[in-house]
Amino acid sequence: MDFAVALVNLAGRNGPNLFQWIGIIIAAAIVAGILYLITLFVIIGGHRFSAGAKFLWIFGVLPWPIIGPLVYLLVGRHMKFIKASVREQEDAAPAIEAPKAETPKA
C-alpha cells in the first residue's frame, strides 16, 4: 500500500523533484547491475554452451547492460546450440517407458 501511495505522490502535479529523480536513477542502476551480474554468472557457470558460445554471449551482453541480459535470459537460455558432450548426455538419457499391461491368466 505504501508503494501505491509513493507512486501517487511521485505522479503529482509538479512531477518528481531532483532528489526523487536521483533515487529513481540509482534504483534502476542497481536493478540493471544485479541483472547484468546474474546473467554473466549464468553464462560463465553454465555447462550447456561451448567456450566459443560463452565468448559470443559474453561479448554480446557486455555492450548493452539492460537489453543484453534480458535477451539472454529470455532467448539465449533456451537455444539448441549446446556442447556436444551435453547433447550426447541428453540423447543417451533413457526414455521412460509405460508399464506393460499384464495379461490375465485363465
Image (cartoon, rainbow, N blue to C red):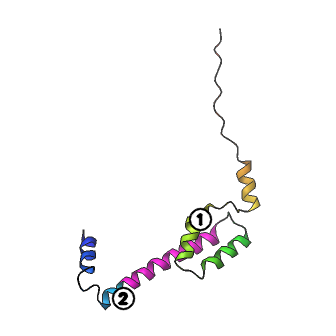
x then y, percent, for residue 11: 27, 79
At label 2, which amino acid type do we have? Ile
Residue at 70%, 47% (x, y): give it.
93
At label 1, which amino acid type do we have? Val
- Residue position for label 1: 75
Q: Quadrant of the N terminus?
A: bottom left
Residue mark closest to the camera, 1 vs 2: 1
- Residue position for label 2: 22
Closest to the observer: 2 or 10? 10
- Judged by its main secondary structure, the magenta piece is helix
- Residue span colored magenta: 24-46
Q: CA distance from mark 1 to mark 2?
A: 32 Å
Dot 1: element? loop
Closest to the observer: 47 or 12? 12
Would you say residue 42 sits in the magenta stretch?
Answer: yes
Mark 2 closeness class: few <14, some 14–19, many ≥20 residues within 10 Å: few
Q: Is residue 28 left or right of residue 46?
A: left
Residue at 65%, 73% (x, y): give it.
57
Q: Is residue 71 left or right of residue 88?
A: left
